[in-house]
Image (cartoon, rainbow, N blue to C red):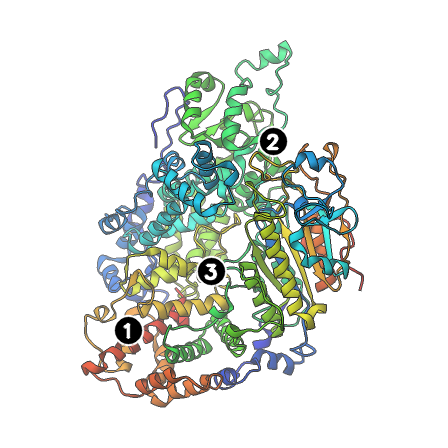
Amino acid sequence: MKTMPRFFLSMSVFLGGWLFSSSISDQSKIRFPYKAAGLNERQAAAHLLSRFTYGATPGQIDAVVKQGLTKWFHDQLEAKIPDDTLTSKLKSYDSIELTNEEVLMIYPKQPQVLRMAVKDGFINKDSVGTNSEQNKAALETYMQQNNIRPQKELYRQFINQKILRAAHTNNQLQEVMTSFWFNHFNVSLTKNDCAQFIPAYERDVVRPNSLGKFEELLLATAKSPAMLYYLDNFSSAAGNNKFASKKKTNQQKADDKTAPQNDPLIDSLINMLQKVKKEKGLNENYAREVMELHTLGVDGGYTQEDVTQAARILTGWTVYPIQPYTRDTLRQRAQKLDRQGFVREGDFLFAANRHDSGTKTVLGKQYGPDQGYSEGMQLLQDLAHHANTAKFISQKIAVRFVNDNPPKSLVDKMAKTFLSENGDIKAVLTAMVSAPEFWAASALREKTKSPLELAVGAVRSLNATITEPYQLYNWISKMGEKMYSYQAPTGFPDKGQYWISTGALLNRMNFGLALSANRISGVRVNLPALNQFHEPESSQAALITYSKLIMPERDISKTVERLEPMLNDPELSEKVDKASNKMKPENAGDVMSSERTKKPVSNSKANRKESGTMLAQVVGVIIGSPEYQRR
Amino acid sequence: MLSRRAFLKSGGVALFSAGIAGSIPAFAVQAAAANKTAFPFAKKKTLVCIFQRGAMDGLMAVTPFNDTFLKTARPNLLMSAAQSTSDKPLIDLDGRFGLHPSMQVFESLFREKRLAIVHGIGSPNTTRSHFDAQDYMESGTPFNKGTASGWLNRAVGLLKDEALTPFTAVSLTSAMPRSFYGDNPSVSISNLQDFAIQMKGNQSGANMAAKSFEDLYDQTASGLLQETGRESFEAMKLLKTADLKNYKPEPGITYPNSALGNSLKQIAQLIKMNVGLEVAFAESNGWDTHFNQGAANGVFARNVADLSNSISSFWNDLSAYQDDVTVMTMTEFGRTVRQNGTRGTDHGRASCNFILGNDVNGGLVHGKMQPIAVENLEDGRDLAVTTDFRSVFSEVADKHLKLTDDKTLFPDWQGEKIGVMRDA
């Protein structure tokens, strides 16, 4: 966090939840009732890994058993395992640590760059949109000379780091929870106004709070530029601010002694930088979604009137102008602003002159009058600790980690813990894992992997090397999860039915085939290395060996049973070809390749290549198999 | 509630033998056997929606050329309907409105009364943010961001079919559009040829893998994976029989080689295949014309040429299906009445849209657009919204797809329909 000027109300917020909470995270007190559910330790470890990581790496089940399941879980909750491998993989990404201010300087929006280039005489105003090639070149030169970089590079780096992080971080649970909370407090790259702030949003707002206190997480999202722009609260201002009028009676003036005076300069500066213009007025979007989607849930017992009142409470919650000129001007007036109740925290600004200072009532409780910034703080804290929030958040966590329809008994336990432990996320997760429902047969392998989980999980299963994460991003998009681009504030639906549709399913199968055959550039698998370079005796042996390697602790009998005939029956491939060739009778390539597969696989050098092809195909089918889509 | 998987329930189809080799999709056979629909190959009504992203300047597409205020407001953008000018003139539709000359192919459709225009259409929410306005238009709830579903997905939920097919709702886009968000089955795919098991340069391997996958999905214990797996292979084989790559439109018809042209061409293929397509979606980009918009020539002219030529090719390609197809365009808002300092236009309010079909009340410019004059402008700058987009969308959905449940389609809306469709 940036050093805050002394004259602003100093609200040094602890990015909460980091403090060790002994009653919760003490591993000696964690009990995993998996034996009662009929699971052995390895099976239990496999279940833990399926729930709290992006997929087990080869040998990881053994490692977790050796370490002890509760110790492993405890370390994951603490999320302090050194991450040297990841750090070195991220070294070449020079934009992922930029502050919002730096992002705006280096990666301005395209139209803004164009305007700057026109203003500086690099591009003729009249030629814009007509002479594209020449202008493109001029624009590039202009950007280079001014150290301006194209925005898509920022997003590319951001997406790349996420994929690498998911694949390689040792603190897997923290990353899984980061994805979970990002989706819960969704913002979207599709909204231009908030897009630039999204890398910092995930990095500074979501990840550090992902295993902390729900209240801190909620407050941090509420004050983030990404959310303020995404749900429009940045522009929300009192419709009839009594301070807006300059003509006041003496009595009013006496009443207003401590209250903010309208400062046209300040307001115009803020407006100018936030494009508020004429759209000023109350905006209810954030107030509605914070209740419907972030805290209470759609059936959380609030009314439209509560939404309107909450929106009034949150008027003035906006983004601190980030451009240097405005910052200087505001800094010069800081003392005065401070007295008037303005509050600055990093990129957040409470603009007291836009706040509705009247009395409001939400869910039966009165807020204000004239309490300014603290009204909003109080409201969000009240929402964070509401019983319906406890239920709603617990339900959502259980859906993510247990199954699409978690038992009420489990959700109730979690909600109880949520309330008694003040929304401590670690405690809620611990309560979940300590419950028999978590280990029940109805929870095992009952979740469908999202495309990100499938892609990264496959990379982890196969120990693949990623040199171009963006290639995986393209596949993940094709499979139906365009990362960071879900348009609606609901986030991606967390249910199997959403992910498994016809087109998406075929792409999952194609992904498996492409990955295992090294047809995804920038991602390399070494299948012989996965089996310590022991070449399987036969294609059947390969099938069994690799099924076990890729799907440890799973029932692979069905997969083997169905795939074995294919490998054994030299006639079958021919039949398949014939059948499919009925539509395309002339296909020499097919005949040749079916000849090839007819021969039994041996260890001779000549056959090594085709056995490699066959192995890749077997592995590809395993990755695309129904069993592998589940976790 | 629709039974999505009805066509799969009898199960046990010899997918491999009948599917790959045969050309009749098993789901069709089953649906027929179950007597669920009159005949599986019976034509479905199809609604094709085209979203023009970026906000089309409705006043340039369809210009009220008598409104003299435009002369001062748009010195570089206004075209004349008079024949004498050096540039191609506006196409005079009705003495008041002139169609952009690059949309010439629309003229005959308009004169034949198949093409209707609604002018002054837009959203009651005054936001001038592309994102917000598109979001509201696609969710169909202009004041509620949290609506999880899109209006076209809700439309799918209201279809009266006993059984849906994998192609009931298809978006020819790489990512699922907001309009399609929701629980009802829908597919987004930018290229139908991707609907296959692919191993580059190894067709035999791909066939083998496809067979393996089909077997595995056929026997899996997970109902969702099993059913979707079956559907996927059904759909895949069906498309395989169609030889998509070598598609030949009707003689004399050439689609523009553009994103929209390609999307509409593929929608035409699906319609001709009778695979049950009822809701289709495509996009057209590049309408955010802040700079040098042009007039008879230029960016805007190229855009409307692509739009109208794509739609017209699509329409003529479907000559045998025209009674069953309606095309509707939409855009998030219009643009400022006055041109800006860079000979373009900025974000405004109302725009216009186009509706094409044999049951459309065509040959008319609908709406209650006031003459362009200072006193009639919204916020002193924009063409005012005089027709709520939901009024038009719901009427088209109602008359073409027989979706009468406006409450589900547009939950917060109550209002009058304006007669853009003819009574059957």
Disc 3 target residue: A480
* Disc 1 secondary structure class: helix
Q: Quadrant of the C terminus of chain A?
A: bottom left
Q: Chain letter of disc 2?
A: A
Depth check, front residue: A176 or A114: A114
Q: Chain letter of disc 3?
A: A
> How far apart are the two marked residues, 3 and 1, measured between alpha carbons?
27 Å
Q: Amino acid at mark 1?
A: Tyr
Q: Amino acid at mark 3?
A: Gly
Q: Amino acid at mark 2?
A: Lys
- Give the side of residue A448 with respect to residue A232, left or right: left
Please state the horizontal and vertical placement of residue B5, each as a whole percent of the image. 58, 72
Disc 1 target residue: A546
Figure check: B165 above or below A422: below
* Disc 2 secondary structure class: helix
Instruction: Give whichever of discs 3 and 2 has the lower sequence position.
Output: 2
Mark 1 and mark 2 in contact? Answer it, CB < 8 Å. Answer: no
Instruction: Give whichever of discs 3 and 1 has the lower sequence position.
Output: 3
